[in-house]
Image (spheres, rainbow, N blue to C red):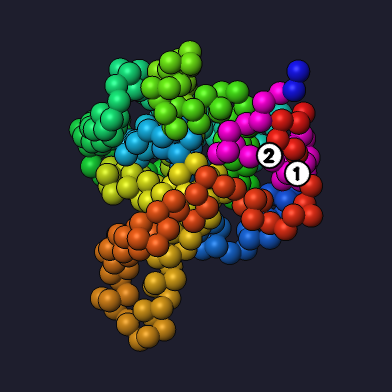
Amino acid sequence: MESSAPPSPAPGIPAGLRGILPVLVALPVLALFAWALSASPFATYLLSIMGVNIVLAVSLNIVNGMTGQFSIGHAGFMAVGAYVAGVLGLSLKEVAISGLPVVVSDQIFLLVALLVGGVMAALCGFLVGLPSLRLRGDYLAIVTLGFGEIIRVIVQNTDAFGRSLGLSGIPQTAGLGMVGFWVFVVVLVARRIAGSSHGRSLWAIREDEVAAEAMGVDTTGYKVRAFVVSAFFAGVAGGLFAHFVPIINPNSFTFIRSMEIVVMVVLGGLGSTTGAIVAAMFLTLLPEALRSAFTSMGAQGSLAQKVDQIRMPVYGLLLVALMLLRPQGLFGTREFWEVLPRWIPRRKKGGP
Protein backbone atom coordinates (compact mmCIF):
# COMPACT_ATOMS: atom_id res chain seq x y z
CA MET A 1 0.00 0.00 0.00
CA GLU A 2 1.46 3.29 -1.04
CA SER A 3 2.06 5.70 1.83
CA SER A 4 0.17 8.96 1.76
CA ALA A 5 1.96 12.21 0.98
CA PRO A 6 2.66 14.59 3.85
CA PRO A 7 0.66 17.80 4.06
CA SER A 8 1.88 20.82 2.17
CA PRO A 9 3.47 22.62 5.15
CA ALA A 10 5.91 19.71 5.63
CA PRO A 11 7.64 19.19 2.27
CA GLY A 12 10.39 16.72 1.50
CA ILE A 13 13.85 17.38 2.87
CA PRO A 14 16.86 17.36 0.54
CA ALA A 15 18.65 14.02 0.55
CA GLY A 16 21.86 15.65 1.77
CA LEU A 17 20.17 16.91 4.94
CA ARG A 18 19.01 13.50 6.12
CA GLY A 19 20.85 10.85 8.09
CA ILE A 20 24.08 11.40 10.01
CA LEU A 21 25.72 13.59 7.36
CA PRO A 22 24.62 16.93 8.95
CA VAL A 23 26.21 15.88 12.25
CA LEU A 24 29.50 14.85 10.63
CA VAL A 25 29.69 18.15 8.74
CA ALA A 26 28.43 20.48 11.47
CA LEU A 27 30.77 19.51 14.32
CA PRO A 28 34.12 20.25 12.60
CA VAL A 29 32.66 23.37 10.98
CA LEU A 30 31.56 24.67 14.39
CA ALA A 31 34.98 23.96 15.89
CA LEU A 32 36.77 25.71 13.01
CA PHE A 33 34.38 28.67 13.15
CA ALA A 34 34.86 29.13 16.90
CA TRP A 35 38.66 28.96 16.53
CA ALA A 36 38.71 31.49 13.68
CA LEU A 37 36.72 34.06 15.67
CA SER A 38 38.39 33.54 19.03
CA ALA A 39 40.64 36.57 18.44
CA SER A 40 37.67 38.97 18.15
CA PRO A 41 35.72 39.23 21.44
CA PHE A 42 33.07 41.53 19.96
CA ALA A 43 32.41 39.23 16.99
CA THR A 44 32.23 36.26 19.35
CA TYR A 45 29.77 38.08 21.62
CA LEU A 46 27.59 39.24 18.72
CA LEU A 47 27.50 35.78 17.14
CA SER A 48 26.69 34.25 20.54
CA ILE A 49 23.73 36.62 20.91
CA MET A 50 22.68 35.67 17.39
CA GLY A 51 22.91 31.97 18.25
CA VAL A 52 20.77 32.42 21.37
CA ASN A 53 18.18 34.33 19.33
CA ILE A 54 18.11 31.54 16.75
CA VAL A 55 17.50 28.93 19.46
CA LEU A 56 14.69 31.08 20.90
CA ALA A 57 13.07 31.79 17.52
CA VAL A 58 13.24 28.20 16.24
CA SER A 59 11.89 26.81 19.52
CA LEU A 60 9.01 29.31 19.62
CA ASN A 61 8.24 28.45 16.00
CA ILE A 62 7.37 24.91 17.12
CA VAL A 63 4.43 26.36 19.10
CA ASN A 64 3.48 29.50 17.18
CA GLY A 65 4.29 28.23 13.71
CA MET A 66 3.79 24.48 13.55
CA THR A 67 0.99 24.18 16.10
CA GLY A 68 -0.75 27.47 15.37
CA GLN A 69 -0.90 28.57 19.02
CA PHE A 70 0.14 32.02 20.24
CA SER A 71 2.65 32.22 23.08
CA ILE A 72 4.04 35.60 24.12
CA GLY A 73 5.89 34.61 27.28
CA HIS A 74 8.98 32.92 25.87
CA ALA A 75 11.27 35.24 27.83
CA GLY A 76 9.79 33.79 31.03
CA PHE A 77 11.05 30.29 30.16
CA MET A 78 14.35 31.83 29.11
CA ALA A 79 14.59 33.48 32.56
CA VAL A 80 13.92 30.17 34.33
CA GLY A 81 16.74 28.49 32.42
CA ALA A 82 19.10 31.46 32.86
CA TYR A 83 18.72 31.74 36.63
CA VAL A 84 18.68 28.01 37.35
CA ALA A 85 21.75 27.41 35.17
CA GLY A 86 23.40 30.55 36.58
CA VAL A 87 22.94 29.50 40.22
CA LEU A 88 24.16 25.99 39.39
CA GLY A 89 27.14 27.42 37.53
CA LEU A 90 28.05 29.60 40.53
CA SER A 91 27.85 26.63 42.88
CA LEU A 92 30.15 24.56 40.64
CA LYS A 93 32.53 27.41 39.88
CA GLU A 94 35.35 26.13 42.09
CA VAL A 95 34.78 22.44 41.34
CA ALA A 96 36.74 20.43 38.78
CA ILE A 97 36.63 16.81 37.66
CA SER A 98 39.87 15.08 38.58
CA GLY A 99 41.79 13.55 35.72
CA LEU A 100 40.36 15.92 33.11
CA PRO A 101 41.69 19.22 31.78
CA VAL A 102 40.06 22.27 33.34
CA VAL A 103 38.54 23.32 30.01
CA VAL A 104 36.89 19.94 29.51
CA SER A 105 35.65 19.88 33.11
CA ASP A 106 34.14 23.36 32.71
CA GLN A 107 32.33 22.34 29.54
CA ILE A 108 30.88 19.24 31.23
CA PHE A 109 29.59 21.33 34.12
CA LEU A 110 28.21 23.88 31.64
CA LEU A 111 26.37 21.13 29.77
CA VAL A 112 24.90 19.84 33.04
CA ALA A 113 23.79 23.37 34.01
CA LEU A 114 22.17 23.89 30.60
CA LEU A 115 20.30 20.60 30.78
CA VAL A 116 19.07 21.29 34.32
CA GLY A 117 17.95 24.79 33.32
CA GLY A 118 16.21 23.40 30.23
CA VAL A 119 14.45 20.68 32.25
CA MET A 120 13.22 23.22 34.82
CA ALA A 121 11.90 25.45 32.01
CA ALA A 122 10.23 22.41 30.41
CA LEU A 123 8.58 21.57 33.74
CA CYS A 124 7.27 25.14 33.97
CA GLY A 125 6.05 24.81 30.39
CA PHE A 126 4.17 21.64 31.32
CA LEU A 127 2.57 23.26 34.37
CA VAL A 128 1.57 26.34 32.36
CA GLY A 129 0.54 24.55 29.18
CA LEU A 130 -1.48 21.67 30.59
CA PRO A 131 -4.42 23.78 31.83
CA SER A 132 -4.23 26.58 29.26
CA LEU A 133 -3.80 24.44 26.12
CA ARG A 134 -7.10 22.70 26.80
CA LEU A 135 -8.72 25.99 25.81
CA ARG A 136 -8.89 27.67 22.42
CA GLY A 137 -8.39 31.21 21.23
CA ASP A 138 -6.20 33.76 22.96
CA TYR A 139 -6.08 32.08 26.37
CA LEU A 140 -2.54 30.76 25.86
CA ALA A 141 -1.27 34.25 25.05
CA ILE A 142 -2.82 35.64 28.23
CA VAL A 143 -1.47 32.79 30.39
CA THR A 144 2.07 32.97 29.00
CA LEU A 145 2.11 36.76 29.35
CA GLY A 146 1.13 36.39 33.00
CA PHE A 147 3.72 33.64 33.52
CA GLY A 148 6.52 35.83 32.16
CA GLU A 149 5.60 38.67 34.51
CA ILE A 150 5.27 36.30 37.50
CA ILE A 151 8.76 34.93 36.89
CA ARG A 152 10.20 38.44 36.64
CA VAL A 153 8.57 39.52 39.90
CA ILE A 154 9.75 36.35 41.68
CA VAL A 155 13.32 36.97 40.52
CA GLN A 156 13.19 40.62 41.64
CA ASN A 157 12.21 39.56 45.17
CA THR A 158 14.45 36.51 45.69
CA ASP A 159 17.82 36.92 47.38
CA ALA A 160 19.23 33.75 45.79
CA PHE A 161 18.67 35.31 42.35
CA GLY A 162 20.20 38.67 43.27
CA ARG A 163 16.91 40.58 43.33
CA SER A 164 16.85 43.58 40.97
CA LEU A 165 20.65 43.76 40.84
CA GLY A 166 20.84 40.35 39.19
CA LEU A 167 23.41 37.57 39.26
CA SER A 168 27.07 38.27 38.62
CA GLY A 169 30.21 36.18 38.74
CA ILE A 170 28.74 33.33 36.67
CA PRO A 171 31.63 31.51 34.93
CA GLN A 172 31.89 32.68 31.33
CA THR A 173 32.30 29.23 29.83
CA ALA A 174 29.73 29.33 27.01
CA GLY A 175 31.89 29.77 23.95
CA LEU A 176 30.79 30.09 20.36
CA GLY A 177 31.21 26.36 19.83
CA MET A 178 28.72 25.48 22.57
CA VAL A 179 26.23 28.06 21.29
CA GLY A 180 26.60 26.72 17.75
CA PHE A 181 26.11 23.17 19.00
CA TRP A 182 22.72 24.04 20.53
CA VAL A 183 21.72 25.95 17.40
CA PHE A 184 22.40 22.79 15.44
CA VAL A 185 20.45 20.66 17.95
CA VAL A 186 17.34 22.87 18.00
CA VAL A 187 17.24 23.12 14.19
CA LEU A 188 17.70 19.36 13.86
CA VAL A 189 14.93 18.65 16.40
CA ALA A 190 12.56 21.16 14.79
CA ARG A 191 13.05 19.68 11.32
CA ARG A 192 12.72 16.10 12.56
CA ILE A 193 9.49 17.02 14.36
CA ALA A 194 8.13 18.73 11.25
CA GLY A 195 8.71 15.65 9.12
CA SER A 196 7.46 13.08 11.64
CA SER A 197 4.00 11.73 12.40
CA HIS A 198 4.02 13.95 15.47
CA GLY A 199 4.67 16.92 13.23
CA ARG A 200 1.82 15.97 10.91
CA SER A 201 -0.49 16.04 13.90
CA LEU A 202 0.81 19.50 14.81
CA TRP A 203 0.22 20.74 11.25
CA ALA A 204 -3.30 19.29 11.38
CA ILE A 205 -4.00 21.14 14.63
CA ARG A 206 -2.73 24.34 13.08
CA GLU A 207 -4.93 24.02 9.98
CA ASP A 208 -8.16 23.01 11.76
CA GLU A 209 -8.12 21.94 15.40
CA VAL A 210 -11.76 20.87 15.41
CA ALA A 211 -11.31 18.65 12.36
CA ALA A 212 -8.08 17.18 13.79
CA GLU A 213 -9.84 16.32 17.03
CA ALA A 214 -12.73 14.77 15.10
CA MET A 215 -10.21 12.55 13.28
CA GLY A 216 -8.92 11.20 16.60
CA VAL A 217 -5.89 13.44 17.17
CA ASP A 218 -5.18 14.09 20.84
CA THR A 219 -4.97 17.84 20.33
CA THR A 220 -4.28 18.73 23.96
CA GLY A 221 -1.55 16.10 24.30
CA TYR A 222 0.25 17.15 21.14
CA LYS A 223 0.04 20.85 22.00
CA VAL A 224 1.42 20.25 25.49
CA ARG A 225 4.32 18.17 24.11
CA ALA A 226 5.19 20.88 21.59
CA PHE A 227 4.99 23.51 24.33
CA VAL A 228 7.29 21.50 26.62
CA VAL A 229 9.90 21.02 23.87
CA SER A 230 9.75 24.73 23.07
CA ALA A 231 10.13 25.69 26.75
CA PHE A 232 13.10 23.31 27.15
CA PHE A 233 15.09 24.98 24.38
CA ALA A 234 14.12 28.44 25.70
CA GLY A 235 15.60 27.40 29.05
CA VAL A 236 18.77 26.17 27.35
CA ALA A 237 19.03 29.50 25.49
CA GLY A 238 18.70 31.32 28.82
CA GLY A 239 21.44 29.16 30.33
CA LEU A 240 23.74 29.93 27.42
CA PHE A 241 22.96 33.63 27.77
CA ALA A 242 23.82 33.53 31.48
CA HIS A 243 27.21 31.97 30.78
CA PHE A 244 28.57 34.53 28.33
CA VAL A 245 27.21 37.87 29.62
CA PRO A 246 28.80 39.56 32.66
CA ILE A 247 25.53 39.83 34.59
CA ILE A 248 21.90 38.76 34.22
CA ASN A 249 19.05 40.78 35.73
CA PRO A 250 15.24 40.87 35.40
CA ASN A 251 15.44 43.62 32.76
CA SER A 252 16.88 41.06 30.34
CA PHE A 253 13.65 39.01 30.38
CA THR A 254 10.83 41.52 30.03
CA PHE A 255 7.72 41.41 27.87
CA ILE A 256 9.61 43.38 25.21
CA ARG A 257 12.12 40.52 24.99
CA SER A 258 9.26 38.07 24.40
CA MET A 259 7.87 40.29 21.66
CA GLU A 260 11.26 40.45 19.96
CA ILE A 261 11.21 36.67 19.65
CA VAL A 262 7.62 36.73 18.34
CA VAL A 263 8.68 39.30 15.73
CA MET A 264 11.47 36.97 14.58
CA VAL A 265 9.04 34.10 14.10
CA VAL A 266 6.43 36.21 12.31
CA LEU A 267 9.00 37.93 10.10
CA GLY A 268 10.54 34.63 9.01
CA GLY A 269 7.18 32.99 8.40
CA LEU A 270 5.02 31.00 10.80
CA GLY A 271 6.04 27.38 10.33
CA SER A 272 9.36 27.96 8.55
CA THR A 273 12.44 26.91 10.52
CA THR A 274 14.88 28.50 8.10
CA GLY A 275 12.70 31.63 8.03
CA ALA A 276 13.04 31.93 11.82
CA ILE A 277 16.83 31.55 11.47
CA VAL A 278 17.11 34.25 8.81
CA ALA A 279 14.86 36.64 10.75
CA ALA A 280 16.79 36.07 13.99
CA MET A 281 20.08 36.81 12.23
CA PHE A 282 18.69 39.92 10.57
CA LEU A 283 17.10 41.38 13.70
CA THR A 284 20.22 40.65 15.77
CA LEU A 285 22.44 42.52 13.32
CA LEU A 286 19.94 45.36 12.79
CA PRO A 287 20.84 47.35 15.97
CA GLU A 288 24.53 47.20 15.10
CA ALA A 289 23.77 48.30 11.55
CA LEU A 290 21.74 51.25 12.87
CA ARG A 291 24.52 52.17 15.30
CA SER A 292 27.09 52.07 12.50
CA ALA A 293 24.82 54.13 10.25
CA PHE A 294 24.35 56.82 12.91
CA THR A 295 28.07 56.91 13.62
CA SER A 296 28.93 57.25 9.92
CA MET A 297 26.49 60.16 9.66
CA GLY A 298 28.34 61.91 12.47
CA ALA A 299 25.72 61.17 15.10
CA GLN A 300 28.15 60.89 17.97
CA GLY A 301 26.97 60.94 21.55
CA SER A 302 23.31 60.93 22.48
CA LEU A 303 21.77 59.92 19.13
CA ALA A 304 24.14 57.01 18.63
CA GLN A 305 23.36 55.83 22.17
CA LYS A 306 19.61 55.74 21.49
CA VAL A 307 19.78 52.79 19.13
CA ASP A 308 18.07 50.51 21.67
CA GLN A 309 15.19 53.01 21.95
CA ILE A 310 14.89 53.24 18.17
CA ARG A 311 15.01 49.46 17.72
CA MET A 312 11.45 48.67 18.84
CA PRO A 313 9.81 51.35 16.61
CA VAL A 314 11.87 49.94 13.72
CA TYR A 315 10.58 46.45 14.59
CA GLY A 316 7.04 47.83 14.59
CA LEU A 317 7.50 49.46 11.19
CA LEU A 318 8.92 46.20 9.83
CA LEU A 319 5.89 44.30 11.08
CA VAL A 320 3.47 46.81 9.58
CA ALA A 321 5.28 46.71 6.24
CA LEU A 322 5.42 42.91 6.38
CA MET A 323 1.71 42.55 7.10
CA LEU A 324 0.90 44.85 4.18
CA LEU A 325 3.36 43.47 1.63
CA ARG A 326 3.82 39.83 2.67
CA PRO A 327 1.41 38.68 5.41
CA GLN A 328 2.79 35.11 5.35
CA GLY A 329 6.32 36.26 6.27
CA LEU A 330 9.54 35.97 4.30
CA PHE A 331 9.25 32.21 3.70
CA GLY A 332 5.66 31.47 4.73
CA THR A 333 5.59 27.77 5.62
CA ARG A 334 8.33 26.95 3.10
CA GLU A 335 11.97 26.24 3.84
CA PHE A 336 15.13 27.64 2.31
CA TRP A 337 15.88 24.60 0.14
CA GLU A 338 12.49 24.92 -1.58
CA VAL A 339 13.65 28.10 -3.30
CA LEU A 340 17.03 26.64 -4.31
CA PRO A 341 17.71 25.41 -7.85
CA ARG A 342 15.83 22.24 -8.77
CA TRP A 343 19.00 20.22 -9.44
CA ILE A 344 19.48 19.67 -5.71
CA PRO A 345 18.29 16.09 -4.92
CA ARG A 346 15.10 15.88 -2.87
CA ARG A 347 13.22 13.09 -1.25
CA LYS A 348 10.01 12.43 -3.09
CA LYS A 349 6.77 12.95 -1.23
CA GLY A 350 5.54 9.66 0.11
CA GLY A 351 8.96 8.08 -0.43
CA PRO A 352 11.14 6.40 2.23
Pick the quarter of the image with the C terminus: top right
Q: Is residue 237 visible?
A: no
User: Was residue 109 drawn as part of the magenta stretch in this picture?
Assistant: no
Q: Is residue 210 above or below residue 322?
A: above
Label 2 is placed on what type of residue? Gly
Can you tell which quarter of the image residue 122 is in? top left
Can you tell which quarter of the image residue 343 is in? bottom right
Q: Residue furthest bottom?
A: 298
Q: Is residue 351 above or below residue 170?
A: above
Q: Position of residue 128 (x, y in %)?
A: 32, 23
Residue beneath disc 2: 12
Magenta stretch, residue numbers: 3-27
Q: Position of residue 102 (x, y in %)?
A: 64, 38
Could you tell me if the residues under marks 2 and 1 are in contact, i.e. CB atoms within 8 Å?
yes
Label annotation for residue 19: none
- Give the Cα distance between marks 2 and 1: 6 Å
Prevailing secondary structure of the magenta residues: loop
Residue beneath disc 1: 346
Label 1 is placed on what type of residue? Arg
Can you tell which quarter of the image residue 316 is in? bottom left
- Secondary structure, mark 1, is loop
Q: Nearer the viewer, residue 10 or 242?
A: 10
